[in-house]
Image (cartoon, rainbow, N blue to C red):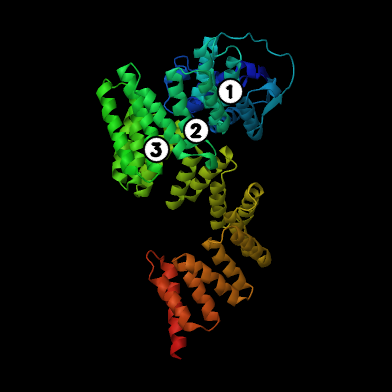
């Protein structure tokens, strides 16, 4: 590599990841072995790296990617660049042009590179310059580009493309092109949490045409907006059901027998979703089972395996709601066998393995989900929890650090990481991490509680009590905060206040530690019989560790001696 690379043109007119895709392709060509370890993110960002890969729009995805996936891709690409930079023997500067006019995907990746950019790599980000000259593409080209952006999860670019397409025609002039761009724009807006704007587009479509296929599709999409995508306060199951019934009525009139069955079955999955949410999982299960039977009757062996996988995945969720995890696991095993590249299925199966105590199997599924995702924060987080349970805090910290590198706002990961630092006695690191979390979420009770514990360990009892009081003001059912504030008040000599806090703790939890602590405080007050009852209660709890059991027996014997004397 030379000392300066570029300039790479990042203008949004060249599409998602303009500029950065070319840069990553150049590195991949230079370091193919390194690139092989980042295939998923590199293919998503720069598909031309693999000439044999099919365009995303031709893969007919069952579900669209979540908008946050681009952040995961940016993390993986940054890991790739950092590993490459670590092999450089002299400084290299990479120039990117038109950064101020870049697509959101490009800016997100450049921001991630800027945060992680290791020596000896330097980024030269330049704004302005001559604008790209782009001709208005034909309608077919616009729809192709729109479909590709939607399939790849690049929703800002998809929305711009759809708007450009809508501006070139009217419903009267080219209804097919107008509708394709309208529904594409609505899909992009819903993915970007702008579902109310998507709803307006479907109302516009119904006002513009009575074409039965368009009104059928618009009815189903409207139902899903009311069921899933609108803000929680605006979701309306009754409205969703009415729109689904309209879609089903129109589907029943389709001339093609196979398409009539396919459309009917998949619209009924919306009804099954509503039934399950309404506390009627048995009715939802009947709909799904009936749908699978009808699909089997009209599909050839091996035809549309992802469609069948989707229904079985839905059925697995219903089996869980019915309290049948074994049947849910059987469905997920079948789903994964037929659609082995969907990370969502592995996350769901890992949860079942975890609940059944099959920790190694759960970790393997999380490993696969992370590889296919790529870099799903929830998979890293759940794997960290399992690693901690297995007594591997170092591996847990590595996973939690990755979660926060991908998603700095992941509060559960921040809380877990602070607690891990605290457990190993790294008070400076724990305090820094807790304060960083509180800078993002100043009223997060778990972080306030943990920081209070850190300050208590350091002897700042007044500050610790204030932090724990703030935590309880936000979450009065947080047992740890009551227990920790009681310990602080006990150390400050206010034993009666400590007992009052522990009264709250034991009212909320039957766990042994609050009872042990209250018994200790009651002994200080000379209330031996009450203390003995707390120790007895704690000793009766299952799963006590040996040291706690020994301490409880010692204190109980002391109480009995005091009462006997």
Query: Mark 1 or mark 2, which is nearer to you?
Result: 2
Q: Is residue 235 visible?
A: yes
Q: Residue at label 1?
A: 159
- The answer to whether residue 359 is left or right of residue 289 is right
**Which mark, residue 225?**
2
The residue sitting at the bottom extreme is 565
Query: Label 2's element?
Result: helix
Quick one: label 2, few (<14), some, or many (20+) residues within 10 Å? many
Q: Position of residue 77 (x, y in %)?
A: 56, 28
The earlier-in-sequence mark between 1 and 2 is 1
Q: Quadrant of residue 268?
A: top left
- The answer to whether residue 322 is left or right of residue 127 is left
The earlier-in-sequence mark between 2 and 3 is 2
CB atoms at circles 3 and 1 under 8 Å apart?
A: no
Q: Position of residue 80 (x, y in %)?
A: 55, 29
Q: CA distance from mark 2 to mark 3?
A: 13 Å
Q: CA distance from mark 1 to mark 2?
A: 17 Å
Question: On screen, 357 above or below 298?
Answer: below
Query: Label 3's element?
Result: helix
Quick one: label 1, few (<14), some, or many (20+) residues within 10 Å? many
Quadrant into which the N terminus falls: top right
**Which mark, residue 273?**
3
Query: Label 1's element?
Result: helix
Q: CA distance from mark 3 to mark 1?
A: 28 Å
Q: Quadrant of residue 178?
A: top right
């Amino acid at each position: 590599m030379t000392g300066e690379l570029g300039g790479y043109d990042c203008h949004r007119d060249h599409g998602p990841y303009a500029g950065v895709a070319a840069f990553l392709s150049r590195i991949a060509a230079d370091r193919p072995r390194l690139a092989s370890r980042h295939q998923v993110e590199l293919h998503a960002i720069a598909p031309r790296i693999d000439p044999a890969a099919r365009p995303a729009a031709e893969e007919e995805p069952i579900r669209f990617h979540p908008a946050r996936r681009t952040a995961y891709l940016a993390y993986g690409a940054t890991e790739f660049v950092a590993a490459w930079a670590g092999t450089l023997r002299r400084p290299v500067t990479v120039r990117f042009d038109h950064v101020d006019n870049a697509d959101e995907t490009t800016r997100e990746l450049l921001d991630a590179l800027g945060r992680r950019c290791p020596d000896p790599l330097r980024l030269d980000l330049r704004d302005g310059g001559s604008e790209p000259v782009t001709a208005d593409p034909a309608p077919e080209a616009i729809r192709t580009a729109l479909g590709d952006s939607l399939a790849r999860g690049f929703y800002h670019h998809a929305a711009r493309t759809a708007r450009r397409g809508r501006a070139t025609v009217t419903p009267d002039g080219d209804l097919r092109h107008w509708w394709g761009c309208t529904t594409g724009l609505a899909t992009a807006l819903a993915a970007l949490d702008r579902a109310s704007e998507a709803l307006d587009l479907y109302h516009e479509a119904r006002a513009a045409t009575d074409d039965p296929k368009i009104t059928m599709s618009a009815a189903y999409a409207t139902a899903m907006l009311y069921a899933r995508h609108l803000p929680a306060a605006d979701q309306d199951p009754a409205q969703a059901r009415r729109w689904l019934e309209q879609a089903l009525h129109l589907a029943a009139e389709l001339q093609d027998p196979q398409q009539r069955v396919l459309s009917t079955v998949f619209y009924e999955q919306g009804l099954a979703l509503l039934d399950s949410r309404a506390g009627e999982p048995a009715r939802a299960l009947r709909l799904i089972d009936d749908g699978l039977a009808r699909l089997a009757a009209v599909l050839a062996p091996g035809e549309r395996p992802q469609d069948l996988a989707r229904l079985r995945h839905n059925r697995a969720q219903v089996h869980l709601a019915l309290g049948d995890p074994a049947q849910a696991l059987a469905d997920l095993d079948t789903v994964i066998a037929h659609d082995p590249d969907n990370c969502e299925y592995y996350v769901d199966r890992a949860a079942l393995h975890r609940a059944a105590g099959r920790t190694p199997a759960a970790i393997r599924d999380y490993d696969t989900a992370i590889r296919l995702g790529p870099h799903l924060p929830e998979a890293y987080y759940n794997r960290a929890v399992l690693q901690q349970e297995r007594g591997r805090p170092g591996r847990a910290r590595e996973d939690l650090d990755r979660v926060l590198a991908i998603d700095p706002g992941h509060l559960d990961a921040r809380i877990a990481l602070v607690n891990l630092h605290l457990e190993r006695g790294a008070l400076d690191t724990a305090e820094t991490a807790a304060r960083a979390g509180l800078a993002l979420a100043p009223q997060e009770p778990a972080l306030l509680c943990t920081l209070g514990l850190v300050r208590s360990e350091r002897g700042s009892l007044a500050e610790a009590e204030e932090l724990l009081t703030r935590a309880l003001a936000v979450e009065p059912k947080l047992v740890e905060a009551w227990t920790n504030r009681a310990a602080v008040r006990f150390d400050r000599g206010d034993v009666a206040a400590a007992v009052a806090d522990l009264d709250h703790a034991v009212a909320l939890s039957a766990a042994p530690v609050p009872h042990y602590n209250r018994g200790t405080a009651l002994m200080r007050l000379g209330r031996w019989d009450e203390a003995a009852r707390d120790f007895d209660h704690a000793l009766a709890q299952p799963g006590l560790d040996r040291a706690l059991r020994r301490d409880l027996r010692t204190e109980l014997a002391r109480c009995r001696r005091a009462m006997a004397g």
